[in-house]
Image (spheres, helix red, strand yellow):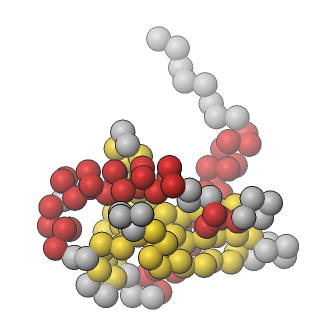
Amino acid sequence: MTAPKPAPANDTARMALGRRAEQLAVEHLERHGAEILLRNFRRRSGELDVVARWRNMLLVVEVRLRSRRDFGGSAASVDIGKQHRIIRTTRQLLQCHPALARWPLRFDVIAVEADPHGEWQLEWIAHAFSASD
């Protein structure tokens, strides 16, 4: 059996940036009163970055990081295919954790971008999409 190849340096750096963006999003949600229930819920259909309870609502939050705005920024990267994967994975989440289904469900996006001065800018987009889209 061969050992797995280490990730290329640029992949490792990108993964570290992604983890940092997700942590910033979690801290932002918590500052606004959200209770983080799960992070990185993975299934074959996809991954849910953050699942939180906020104001008696269940939030499924996709965290998007973009370093460039050429293609519309972070929020624009949550296309219809990504939305469908999130919805499918949310259905699996609710099967695994049926108690979570007692709250109304909302899909949000937190867009994270670095400004030219290296500061992080977060935009919380509530109701970014719905399961009926």
Question: Which of these two is toward me, 133 or 100?
Answer: 133
Residue 96 locus on image (x, y percent): 19, 53
Res. 40 in view: no
Residue 85 locus on image (x, y percent): 42, 50
Question: From what the image shows, is residue 83 above or below residue 75?
Answer: above
Query: Is 66 situated left or right of 59 in this image?
Result: right
The residue drawn where x is 34% and y is 51% is 88
Question: From what the image shows, is residue 6 above or below residue 28?
Answer: above
The residue drawn where x is 15% and y is 61% is 98
Question: Which of these two is toward me, 20 or 112?
Answer: 112
Indicate the quadrant containing the C terminus: top left, top right, bottom left or bottom right: bottom left
Question: Which of these two is toward me, 67 or 36?
Answer: 67
Query: Is 111 situated left or right of 48 in this image?
Result: right
In the displayed image of the protein, which residue is found farthest to the top? 1
Res. 70 in view: yes
Quadrant of the image occupied by residue 51:
bottom left
The residue drawn where x is 56% and y is 59% is 78
In the displayed image of the protein, which residue is found farthest to the front? 133
Query: Is 95 situated left or right of 120 in this image?
Result: left
Question: From what the image shows, is residue 3 above or below residue 81?
Answer: above
In the displayed image of the protein, which residue is found farthest to the right? 116
Residue 30 locus on image (x, y percent): 43, 81
